[in-house]
Amino acid sequence: MERVLTIAGAAAQGSAGIQADLKTFQERNVYGMSAITATVTNQSRTEKKIFLRTIEEIEAQLYTAVEKVGIDAIKTGMLFSTTIIERVVTFIARNKSPYLVVDPVMIGKMGSQLLADDAIEVLKKQLIPLATIITPNRLEAARLLNKKIPETVEELKAYAVQLHELGGSYVFVKGGKMEGKAVDVLYDGESCHIYETEFVDTIHTSGAGCSFAACLTAELAKGVEIRDAIEISKSYVYYAIKHSLSFGKGVGSVQPAAYRLFHNSSQ
């Protein structure tokens, strides 16, 4: 069984981050491991919402994964600080895996800032150049390029090309609803490929980006070619959103098991 490591924040409500990644790894039949960088909470009892783990603890988790199990692919999510990014980069450089999926998590669905301002340049200069593929949404793409949020497919394509200049092998920009459909763009260094799916009109999308990147990581670890891996991951997340879960308290969660439960019945 392929071995996949996620390095990301934990979402206390269970919808995103480490929790979404591990659920997705299980659904995609790979062995999932995690290194938790922080815990994100959204509750009324404490003013503080993000609790960072110590560098010592983060490194201990990373080296436990590589020493006790081994790694076929790595996904990064919420890293938050310059120091954490630098240590993760050092780990990846010393323990190379065939695939690295970088999800440049910056803003949570609940509005939490998940990447410190001074860490953006470190992310761009040190981590992204190591990536097999980066998977920003259009807000993150704009933040990485210090530009306005793209509003058209042509702008999405232009942003994907510019992000490729940061050094990653592939860029996949998630556009969300554009021109009536859900539109994403892949740039492979030579040409752009457009992906369109039906737009699901719901606010219950917490964990969608994490789940997409986790599914992509799992499929790459299994040796699936990148464009096929993207198609699988898009379908996986489409069903997860279409059959999302609402708990009656704000933004609900995508459903990790939805592809398994509903995909075959829709054929």
Image: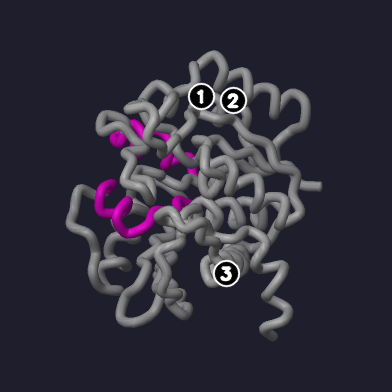
- The part of the chain drawn in magenta is 120-144
Left or right: residue 220 compared with residue 230:
right
Q: Residues within 10 Å of mark 2 (few under 14, many from 20)?
A: few
Q: What's the residue type where badge 2 is placed?
A: Arg
Determine which residue is flagged by label 2.
94
Colouring style: one colour
Q: Are marks 1 and 2 in contact (CB under 8 Å)?
A: yes
Determine which residue is flagged by label 1.
90
Determine which residue is flagged by label 3.
243
Depth check, front residue: 164 or 106? 106
Disc 3 element: loop
Single out the mark in the foreground, 2 or 3: 3
Single out the mark in the foreground, 1 or 3: 3
Is residue 143 rendered magenta in the image?
Answer: yes
Q: Residue at (44%, 65%) from the top-left corner?
A: 186
Residue at the right extreme, as displayed: 1
Disc 2 element: helix
Q: What's the residue type where badge 3 is placed?
A: His
Disc 1 element: helix
Is 246 situated above or below 100? Answer: below
